[in-house]
Each structure stands twice: as C-alpha cells, then as structure tokens.
Image (spheres, rainbow, N blue to C red):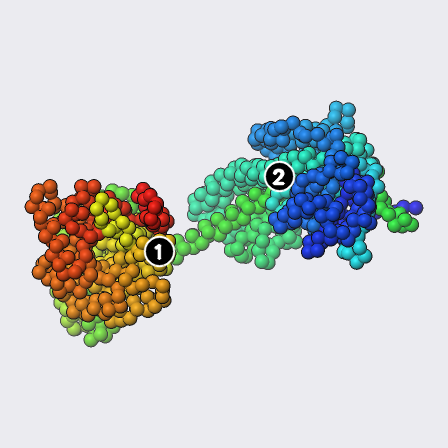
Amino acid sequence: MTAACDPSICETEPIATPGAIQPHGALVTAQADSGLVAHASANLAEILGLPAAAALGRPICDVIGHVNEVLLREARRRGSETLESIGSLRRADGRLLHLHAFQSGDYMCLDLEAVRDEDDRLPPGLTQSVIETFSAAVTQVELCELAVHGLRQVTGYDRVMAYRFGPDGHGEVIAEDLRPDLEPYLGLRYPASDIPQIARALYLRQRVGSIADSHYKPVPLLGHPGIDALDLTHSALRSVSPIHLEYMRNMHTAASLTIGLADGDRLWGMLVCHNMTPRTAGPERRAAAGMIGQVVSLLLSRLGEVENAAEKLARQATLSTLVDRLSIGDTLAAAITAADPLLLDLVGAIGAVVRLEGQELHFGRIPPAEAVRRALEILGPTRPPEILAIDDVTLRHPELPELAAAGSGLLLLPLPSGDGDLIAWFRPEHVQTITWGGNPAEHGTWNPQTRRMSPRASFDAWKETVTGRSLPWTSIELACAHDLGEAITAEMAQRTRAALARLRHYDPLTGLANRSFLQECLANATLAGGPDVALLFIDLDRFKAVNDSMGHGVGDGLLIEVAHSLVASVRPEDLVVRLGGDEFVVLCHGLDRAAVMGLAERLRQVLERPFEVTGRKCHISASIGIAMSDSIGELDLVRAADIAMYAAKKNGGNRGELFRPSLYEETTQLVELDNDLRNALENGQFHLAYQPIFALAPGTERLVGFEALLRWEHPHYGSLQPGVFIPMAEKLGHIHVLGDWALRNALRQVQAFRSAGPELDLKINVNVSPLQLAKPGFAARLTDMLGQMPDLPPHALCLEITETCLSDEAVSEALGAIRALGVQVAIDDFGTGFSSLACLRRLPADIVKLDRAFLKNSSAEPQDDRFFAAVNSLIHAVDLKVVQEGVETPAQIDFIRATGADFAQGFHLARPLSIPAALDLISASRPGRPRPPDRT
C-alpha cells in the first residue's frame, strides 16, 4: 500500500555524503597530515588490482606511487576543492588509470577511472569552435540553442536540453537538440520538486555531474571505524540518490551528464545530457562540458543584462518624458492628467487611479469604482509606505471578485506626501495554458512499510489552464514606479519651495529685494544673454561705529535711509538689493563701462553725505566693487564685485574699484595654495627626484651622489617646480614641515642608494630654506634624524643654501653647528647674488656650486678659458670644491673639465631620475659595469 509523497523528504537525503560511489571507477583518500589511506572503495581491487582492506592504513605512496603522491599533495596545497587532473597510473597488467584529485576536509581524495574506448580524445579545437559560435547569440534563448547543439557534438549524447528555472522554482526546457527518433521535451515545464533545493545547492558547488548507468549498484566506501562521513561533492564518481536513479529509469534514460548554469550565486538553470544506453563521460568530455557551462553562465548573465537594459531603456524614455511633464500645469494633478497615456505605458497597465492633493483621478480602463475603493481600503497604503505588486488579487482576496476582469494585477505606489495619496495601476486577467512533463501535483509515492519513496512514473504531457492571474509585474516596472514616486515627491517639494520663495524674496527691514531674488535674476540674465550686465557691490564704511555708538535702532534707520537713497539714485530698471548687514548691490543692464563707473561715483558721493536718523547725523562712506559681465571670466558677478570691493576697502575705502583678473589671482591664490599645501603631504602629492652628480676625471665621469629635487604633483596644475611653491610655502609658514619631510626622505633614500653601491660612497644633496636654518632647533632636529640612521655617516649629507642668505646671523650660526656634525654645506647658484670672489675665504661651506649662467655666457674665446680657470683656482685656494651646474652639451663638459671643475651635473650627464632609474644608474656605475642610458 502506498500513499502520496511529501517532497520535503528529498531535502533530507545525504546526497553529498552517500558513503558510496558509481562502479566505473574507484576512490581512495588519505589523511593530509599522516598520508595514510583512510578510505577506499570496495571495488579497489577490480580497478587498481589492490584490495581495499590491504590499502587501508598504508601510506598513500604505496598505493599510487611517490610521484603521484607529490602531485596529490601539490593539488591540496593549491587549495582547489574542484576536481583536478594530476596524471595517470598504469596497473601491473598494463591498464591505464586516470587520476583526479580533490580535497574534502582533512582528506586528500583521489578518483581513479580506467581509460576506456569511449574516452578517445576530442577532435582538436572542437570545444573552442563550439564556444566561438556563442558570439552569434543576442538573447539567452538563442545562446541556449547554440549551447545544446554544440554540447551534443562534444558529448555524443542522444538528447541535450537547456533547462531554465523560473522565479517560482519550476523549470522549463527552452532549447533542445536530440536524436531524430526521440520525443521532444522542448517547451515542457517540470515542477520545482523534481530538483530539490539540496540538489540545486550541490550544482552550485560542483557544476558538472555524471551518471554512467542508471541501473548501477553503488560501491560502498570502506574506512576505519570512527572516520566521519566523507563529503563527495567534488568526486566525479559520487553515487547519487536512488530516488533520482529511479526517476531516470522512469524517463527511459540510462546515462546523464548535467552542467549547472549560474548567474552569480543563483542557479539559473542546467544543461542536461541524456543517453538511452549506458555511457561514461570521460574526464576530457567532462572538462569540455564544464568549460562550455562556464562560458554559457558568463554569457547568460551578460545577455540578461542586455535584454533588461533594452527594456529598461524603453521604460526610462517614457519615464523621462513623464517626469518632464510633471512641471507643466498650475497644479501637479493637472500635470499628471495631461500625461495620461504615459502613466499607463510606464508599467504596461490598462488603467490607473491617482489620489493626489485631495483629488482622485481615473485613467484608462479600471474596475468598478466601488471595487477599487474596497481594494484600496484592504490593500493599502502600508506603513511604512512601500510598493505593493500583486498579480493574483482575486485569488488572494476572494471578497474582491469584481477585480477579476480588469484588476487581477495591482501595482500600488504610496506617495510620501501622506493623506492617502497614491497611484494604483491595474492589469487584466491573463489566461494561459501551461504544458507540464507529467502532472505537477503528483510528486511520487511513499511506501510506509519499506519507508521508501518512489518518484512519479508518468512524464506524459499534462496541460494546466491558469486563471485569476495577470502578467507578473517585472523588476524594471517596479523600479520605474519607484522612480516616478521619487519624481512626484521632488516635484511637490519644488512647487512648495517655489511658493515659499515668492514669500522670501524681499528684505523685511528695507523693502529691497534680497539675495535670493538677486541670484534668480542673475541666473535668468545668464540664460537670456543680451546686453552687458554690471553689478556694484556696496559695503558701508564705518557703519559698525554708528551701530555701536548710537544703537541698533539708529543703525536700522540708517540702513533704511541708505536704501531709499540708492533707489532714488539709479534708473527705474536697475535692481537694488540688500544682501545683509551693511552690504548692498545694484544690478543694472545695458550700461557701458564709462556709464557704470559714473554710476558708482554718483552713489559714492550720495553715501558720503551725512544722513539724519531720528534727529541725529550719521557720517558714513562706501567701498564699492564694480564688476562687468564681459570681464570676469568664469567668476560670477557677485563674487567678482565682492573681490573688487575688498580691494577698494584695502586701499582706504570711500572709493570704487573695478574688477580685474589680477585682483582675483591676488585674493584667491594664497587661500587656494594654503589649503592645497596643507593637504599635499597627507595626500602624497610631493615626491623627490634625484639628479646625479659626477666627479670629473680625465676622459670620464664617476657617479658620486645625487641632488634631491622636490616636486609637487598638483591635482589641478600638474607637476610644479620648487620655484613656484617654495616661496609660497615660506610665506604661509609650511616650509618647516615640508623641508623636514624632504630631508628625512632624502636621508632614508641615500641610505638605500649606498646599500645598492657600497663601494661608491654616495652622497645626497638637499636644498634647505634660510627660514628652516633660522628657526631655533634645526641643528638639533638634524642630529635626531641622523641618530635614527646610525649606519649613515654624516659626510654623506650635503645641505645646499643660496648665497643670499649668508648675511643672516642666525643662518650662519646654524651652518656652524651643522658643519660641526660632519655634514657638508654647499653654496648653491654661486654668482647670481651679490657675493664677490673676495669673500670666498669667509664662507661657512665646503662646496661652491657655480650657477648655469656661467656656462650660458661662455664662448670658445681663450679669455673664457682663462676666466674659468681663475675662478676655479680661487675657490680651490680656500679649500673648497667646485660643482658646475647646468651642463647640457659635450662641449661644456670638456670645457669645465679643462678649466678645473671638480664635479658636474646637468641634463647632458643625467636628468633628474626616479628611484628605480637611480638604482639602475648605481648598479651600472659599480666597477666593471657599463653605464645605462639616461631615463627618468
């Protein structure tokens, strides 16, 4: 006696840990730590020639050989859980076995499959050629049609199907390629219970599964007592559920190969291969099927996105037009009424009801009014408001039968304005006939005596007529409804703001227009173009003194009088605005520059006269900034006039000042660079480049060090040279932090350079500002930096200063302390300041760097040779070394070598280098190595 089966029973089956395998191969495992065999299939003797009992407990290398053990451990080290070919093994009788490894917990696992005739290699390039055909697909269905055709070529199975899961979990055959004499399954649907969730989850973990013979008898795994059940998810030999085997036999299927198709972490569907006779899918065909499945999965996701994008694009075009029309009309309800067909087209509805601002609007074909009222009472709006999409209203609510014809589908969008505002769209009933592969209500039978489940035996086509449902609302339609709700909310807010703005356009004290009205006028003037626009920004001088000495009442009275005077002094078409406090603006159109300047002077004179307020005389004046729209560049008029007003006030007040670009640069550059410099170090915008310095010897040059050159990669201005930002850093007080950063990084880098070429005794030159030297504690900070690098000798550092700072007593004192540490000092750009050769003997320095100007002014005349030789001799006479900067030609290097320079640097020798390029140069400069070409 049998009873109806509960399909949830299938969810409890141990399909990943069956404790058995299919008989066309064998399986052994070894514990990862000890390498001893822990499991062996009972047919090991048949497949490998070694009884399972004899293998258990032995080292795995005794079973598969030392080489294969190494390959097995290497596969485990890579951490891959999926099946991986590691080689082959030949039995004593010459029979060849395929070896495939996977890991399961603490076990190294090995599938052993005998090489069979049907394992013949696939034709070269077949899998690739199949995959290449997929590029022709433009829809998911077309891709599946190509996939089943190609997969049948690769596998040789009698039938190959593409099976897609719907949102309800049911499956449908959407593509099929089969032997001509077989009955097609294309278009048939199968209930979700045919493939339990536990099986779907397994196909996400192991995408390829095969069954060689649905009549096989499972081969048990043997193992030592106490060993846990082994997870065989990734084994190609894993035994399957006996219920599934019976299901296959009921379908007259002897063998199967199944490939899971995933979209992200969701099982989209499967490619299913059926054969009417037993068939073993060898490793090569399984791998090819897996590759095809991976490509199909990837392309399915992309084609799905493309298909969705096409639909979304069409809906978005409707939405965009609808949203644009929301701003048309005196009221929002009137605007929506005017957009009637768009409202329905947006979500594919036949009718809609809109409740908004106390009105109820009807569009298209809707159910009877009383039925709509009752439905909206029952279904919404919800709290908190959220979109409600139903495609079976009458099935869920039998008390609403009047909705069946025109309202089986309801999409309800609550509007956040409250008061029951909403939009309800309606869809009619959509009657459809579905063909199932067997009765979907018959899941199978349960025998309580044997406690065994049997799957359904019939797969004959079974037709079902579905009523009471509309077409389902898609995610794109829900998104469009949501976006329309957002747009309606935004339009309502905009209309509210517009109403409030009309109340906020005037200053309550003076009656003048305010800043908000001015901004609108400026925006309209910009959009309209037309005559030149001028703006006068007026700031009252000494108003604060009036306010403080005479009280705020007098101050307010004075502002009113000023407003009256300004209005009386301008043309009727000019706009007078009070920005706030004691700031006023006059906006005028169509005046040339001379007329605007004349107006500014007239207003200045008017405001300079005494004002009488409550019987008391008030004396003020005005600073007036003037800006004209044709001369302010990208600035807005108010900002430009404000800048000019501050210039007028800076120059004493009671005057007008016309905006010019230099005013903007002067007032904004300091602020911008101040902010930029504050953030530059934190954001890693500074870096050091390293220009090599070479010692000059007869006929050659030897690398002795580098000069560290600070660079600023500004996010807007690009690469900035020190001459641009160092003066600004000095002026703004950032030079100390910036200088310490450069010095610390240069010291760290030269230590690395010296390690790369220890025999070169490399040095680093770092430029320092006189402000750094003059600040107390510089020598102490330098001592601390050097102390943190005990392996770096002090003579490896040379600080470069300009000759113009030597007159500063604090700088000279700091240089003495620095040289006492053993750090060298170089006078940079010597010859560009006011020093004379006579002061050389008093310089607190070790090196003199001659400016490049010396070379630019040199010629081939004999007197130049004599002059340079004399300069070098004088410097040498006071025990200083000479570095010539700016060497750019071979002739110049010969010239300075002949006239006695000790060292040289310049583009001819090497440009400033990045750290990798500098290290290359160091490597090549070591004894016996060729020098590389210059690179940055």
- Disc 1 or 2, which lies upstream in sequence? 2
Q: Residues within 10 Å of mark 1 (few under 14, many from 20)?
A: few
Residue 613: tell me if it is visible: yes
Q: Marks 1 and 2, Cα distance to the nearest angstrom?
A: 55 Å
Asked if the residues shown at circle 1 and circle 2 are in contact, with their CB atoms under 8 angstroms apart, the answer is: no
Q: Nearer the viewer, residue 913 or 438?
A: 913
Q: Nearer the viewer, residue 596 or 219?
A: 219
Residue drawn at the location 10% of the way across and 62% of the way down: 839
Which quadrant of the figure has residue 890?
Answer: top left
x, y percent for residue 142: 62, 31
x, y percent for residue 1: 92, 46
Question: What amino acid does circle 1 point to?
Answer: Pro
**In this rendering, position of residue 830 left or right of residue 59:** left
x, y percent for residue 678: 32, 61
Q: Mark 1 points at which residue?
A: 758
Q: Mark 2 points at which residue?
A: 294
Question: What amino acid does circle 2 point to?
Answer: Gln
Furthest-top residue in this view:
180
Residue drawn at the location 12% of the way across and 54% of the way down: 873
- Give the vertical position of 414 relative to 287 (above or below): below
